[in-house]
Image (tube, grey):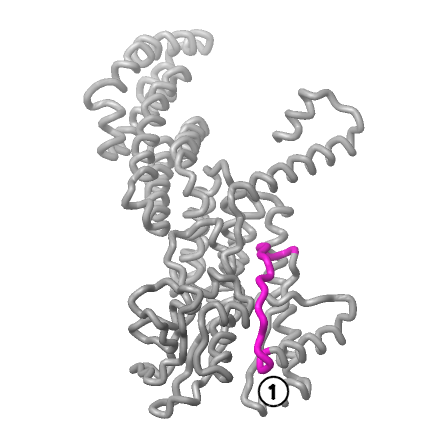
Amino acid sequence: MKEEERANYYLQPETKNPLLQTIQGEIIEKHAPNLVDKDSGCDYMFQHSKLDELALMYRLFKRVDSCLKFIIAKMQPYIENRGDKIVMDEALIKDAVEFTAKLLAFKAEMDDMVERSFLNDIKVQKTRDVAFQNFMNKQDKCPTYIAAYCNNEFVKGLRGVNEAETNSRLDAIIRLFCCLHSRDIFITAYTNYLALRLLNKISLSKDAEELMLQKLKVECGHNTVNKLAQMFNDINISRDLMNEFKGTQTYKNMINSGVEFSAEVLTGGHWPQQPAAPCTLPPELKDYTMKFEQFYKQKFQNRNITWLFKNGSLEVKPVFITAKPYIFAVNCYQAVVLMLFNRNAEMTFSEIKEATNIPENELKESLKYMCNPKQKIIAKQNPKTPEFTPQEVCKIFAEFASPNVKVNFIPTTTDKPDASKAGPGGAQSGPNQLSEERKNIMDAVIVRIMKARRTEKQNQLIEDVMR
């Protein structure tokens, strides 16, 4: 500062700048490569978080435009090397939440360094972002794991967190999301997790969910996020519809017979696609679904309902056990199987499959949880083997006992979070489907541009499509 004051006082303006450039060239530019390569240079400063020393070097090198590149050349490999250790860590890859938490902590550390040491210099920010893009996109699980982390935050991570902290956490996730190349994979997985949260009513905060949508809309555009917003709208409309149904005499008769019924009516195009698996309902359940369909078709004459029984759940009270007033929490498939034994003392696996029309894999999964030796309600002929053979006999286990009054038999998914299994009921969204979606989006963009311009050169069209 003193030298600058003397220069301003003693030197003519036309002399000061050339002289300053010469001095900076001799004192800074010539020695910059050696300074960053020294044992106590940039590598040492990055590894030991010497943020103050980095700030001094930055302010010195900033005087000469050509010197900043020496710091940047050291910074990008440092970030990528540390990032590679995270995304390639076999232990971390087993846990989506811990994996993403490590990425978020590393991103926060680098953001803090860029702000404190480099005053958010645009060139340094770009270097940081490119480095994160390079190492994060080496790991194809990043998009789905970040979506799984978001789901964990909305289900339990944001419990007791104030509005400011919630906003800060979501901002951190969005900054990580911006480093992804396969954003469509993240959106697919996020949509599937959101569907589960809305249908199961397990989200901690509707305000936080809407805040996340706003942040995604800024990064992805209105069209991408519109489907997510429509899902919230469907839930609200469905709630109003069920309230109206509960006011009818039909529902009051159902209550009087000891049955409480609830359904979520969703618009097919707004939710993750999944096939409607066949399932033959017993007369007891069929009657209730038909009554709701009649109510719905009277209200909306040109609409049809497709039942997705795979996603449903029931609470049933067994009457053959008198020791306790047990309540069994089961999914629809399990309820259908249990009701078969109201009319049959025992049945083979193939007979159960034929009577219910439930897909074999789903039937095996549902039965396995009800045949669990720790709390079985159905006894299988070969209890030591978890698999089911076609002629294996199953029957109700009359000696059932549990310390809990309410017993849960609904299968739980313990697989690592994945976009292909994140949807309600495991709707598939694998690589082939994503590739087809990308192709359709590309076709739509080309058509939209050409309809507006009619004629365009190929190179310009490619540039406009990429933009």
For disc 1, the marked residue is: 254
Check the image and report above or below for 11 versus 431: above
Q: Is residue 8 magenta?
A: no
Percent x, y of residue 222: 63, 47
User: Image quadrant of residue 17?
Assistant: top left
Q: Which residues are magenta?
A: 269-285
Q: Is residue 141 left or right of residue 82?
A: right
- What's the residue type where badge 1 is placed? Met
Residue, x 30% and y 24% (percent of image)? Answer: 57
Q: Is residue 275 magenta?
A: yes
What type of secondary structure mainly makes up the magenta span? loop
Percent x, y of residue 102: 32, 45
Q: Is residue 429 left or right of residue 382?
A: right
Residue, x 36% and y 14% (percent of image)? Answer: 7
Residue, x 31% and y 30% (percent of image)? Answer: 81
One can see residue 8 in this view: no
Q: Nearer the viewer, residue 66 or 280?
A: 280
Residue extending farthest to the front is: 391
Check the image and report above or below for 210 versus 435: below
Q: Is residue 2 left or right of residue 168?
A: left
Q: Nearer the viewer, residue 453 or 54?
A: 453
Q: Mark 1 Cα within 10 Å, few/some/many (few <14, many 20+)?
A: some
Tell me the element at label 1. helix
Residue extending farthest to the left is: 39
